[in-house]
Structure formats: structure tokens, C-alpha cells
Amino acid sequence: MRRSLTGSAVLLAAWAFTAPGTAAAAVAAPAPPAAPAPAAPADDDTIVLDEAEGEAPAKPAGDAKAGGEAGVSTDLFGDEKKKAPVTGEAGKVSATSEADQLKQDKAFITVVQRQRFLKKKRFELQPQIGITVNDPFVRHYTVGAELNYWITNRMAVGITGTAFFGNKTSRYTNIRFQESVLLTANKTLWQASVNFLYNPFYGKIAVFNRALMHWESYVQVGGGAIQTQVIPRYEAIHEPFRHLTGQGNFAIGARFYGPRVDWISVNFGVRTWIYQDKLEPPERGPGPNQLDSLDSADAAKDAAVKKLAFNVVFFLGLSFYFPTTFQYTTRR
């Protein structure tokens, strides 16, 4: 069989004959195929260098702003950053003002507290109401007022005025009808006096272990005038007469101060007036032993029987202090 070679085949055969080593090497070790070009990674597969090295991933800008509040002190370039205020309970305490802290301290009971109320160089106006407690036959209700000026926190001078509204009790009437005995009695109309007051005691009372109530006790002495009126035994035919005389009085009482108000106190006490009274003469009235000359009020007053009298009143008062504020002072 006859074969024919083309020109290209002849050239290839000649080259193979002249360079057999090169061809053998090419056949024995073919060149490796070219590595495929790496595919572009997807957005979700992006690998950050910090993550590959084991460091915390960088946060987005929005998260970085929030993270700054957690106390980050440096930025990417090493510059220092100011720390934001601490939040939470620590932030609340640090934000508490001095005034708020003082209020919180006052809310707790401390072992030693200074005097709650100061009265030095202040005026005190005290309306009062009261009732007599020592006369079983004539009951008096009283309405009055007291005005004091405090020289110091313990001493004061003042004036007192009281109106009395008296009437016979049921015992007076019962004795008259059951025992056929006519009682001789007087009723008090008014009194006015000048007083000196002194506070010897001061203290505190715990109220349900929640608050302290400050109190003080006082004694008061004074003198002035008092007027009484006779209650005639035979009121239908005899007129009463009045008697104005001097009197001395003394009182003991206590004051209570609230925890927040600097110009009001609640008071109570017992006051006793001592004076010489004039009673209706026993010869005044109808009967064989009675004197008709004593029917008039003036004649009966001239013949009246003098007797030492006591009038004891329990009273309640509400004091208002002016000026309404005071200032603590400390010696230097």
C-alpha cells in the first residue's frame, strides 16, 4: 500500500528526528493545566482579615455609636474618646444632686437631731378653747387668745385674754329640788393677764419608728384682772351683781411641732386662776330671817361674803409664729 506525506508531516518528522530528548521530555512530563481563575466571592462570603486572625469583628457605624456608651476609650487610629455617663443604678446615684441627697438623709431617723423648732425673737399668736374641770355646779366654756414674744427659745413674755360662758349644771338643779337646798354660786365672765413663760423640758417622740415628733413642756405664771357675776338664789326677784378683782394664775402645758411646718404648733395645758370672790349674802331672800334691804344689787354687793376661789380650765390651742421662718446659727 502506498502512502503519501504532506509537507507539514515531513517538517514534523524532521523536527522529531533532530530533537528526540525534547520530545521525550514533553511526552513524559506534560505541562499541568492552568489553574482556574478564582471565582468572585459572594457578598455573604466576605472574609474579614480580623476574623481570620481571631480578633473581634469590627461593628458597623451604627453599632459603634451604641458601643461607645459601653465605655470604649480609643478609636481605630488610637485616639482617646470621652466616655459617656454611666447608666443604671450607678448613674442615678451620681446624678443625684446635693439637695436631693439632703432630703433623703432627712427621711431617716438619726440618733442625734438638732432642735426642730426655734422661737427666739418671734411672735406667737395662740387662739384657745377650753372647759372648766373643778366646779360641779357651774360649767364654763372658754374662748380666748394669747400673744407672746419669745426672748429666747426658752423664755417668753405675753398677754392672755379669755371669755367665759357659764351656766348651771344638772347637779345644781337636782340638789335644789331633791334636798331643798339653795346653793350659792358665781360664774366667771372674763379675765385678762400678763404672763411669763419658761420651757424647762424638750424632747422627741418616735411615731411608729417612722418619724420623730418634737415636743416641749412649759410653765407659765401671771397676774391680772378677773370679773365674776353672782347667780341669785331667787332669780325671779333678785338681780345679780358683778365683782371685778385682781387674780393670779399659773399654767402647765406642752407644745408639739410637726415635721415639715416651721410656723405652727399644737398646744394643750391646764390653767388655774386664784382670786378673792364675793358671794351672795345668806340673808338675802324672802323669809323670816331675810333682810329686805338686801334686795337691791348694790346693797347685796356691799354685804357680800368674801371667799378665796379657784377656777381650773383645761384648754387646747393652735399657735402661729411670725416671722414664719427661722435660721439656725452656730457659735464660732
Image: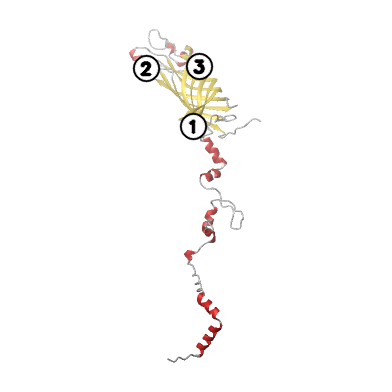
Query: In this rendering, is residue 220 above or below 55?
Result: above
**Image position of 262 (left or right of 131):** right
Q: Which residue is depicted at the point 54% across and 80% down?
A: 20
Q: Residue furthest left?
A: 178
Find numbered disc 2 in the image and state the secondary structure of the residue it sits on: helix
Find numbered disc 1 in the image and state the secondary structure of the residue it sits on: strand
Q: What kind of residue is marked 2? A: Arg
Q: What kind of residue is marked 1? A: Ala
The residue that label 2 is drawn on is 171
Instruction: Mark 1 vs mark 2: give the one in front.
Output: 1
Comparing 144 with 314, the one in front is: 314
Quarter in which the C terminus is drawn: top right
Counting from the top left corner in percent of width and height, residue 247 is at 52, 18
Q: Mark 3 or mark 1, which has the lower sequence index?
A: 1
Counting from the top left corner in percent of width and height, residue 267 is at 49, 27
The residue that label 3 is drawn on is 274
Q: Residues within 10 Å of mark 3 (few under 14, many from 20)?
A: some
Q: Which mark is residue 164?
A: none
Q: Mark 3 or mark 2, which has the lower sequence index?
A: 2
Q: Residues within 10 Å of mark 1 (few under 14, many from 20)?
A: some
The residue that label 1 is drawn on is 211
Counting from the top left corner in percent of width and height, residue 104 is at 52, 38
Callout count: 3
CA separation in Å, label 1 and label 2? 46 Å
CA separation in Å, label 3 and label 1? 41 Å
Find numbered disc 3 in the image and state the secondary structure of the residue it sits on: strand
Confirm or deny contact between disc 1 and disc 2 (CB under 8 A): no
Query: In this rendering, is residue 261 above or below 295?
Result: below
Query: In this rendering, is residue 106 above or below 313?
Result: below
Confirm or deny contact between disc 3 and disc 2 (CB under 8 A): no
Q: Mark 1 or mark 2, which has the lower sequence index?
A: 2
Instruction: Mark 3 vs mark 1: give the one in front.
Output: 1
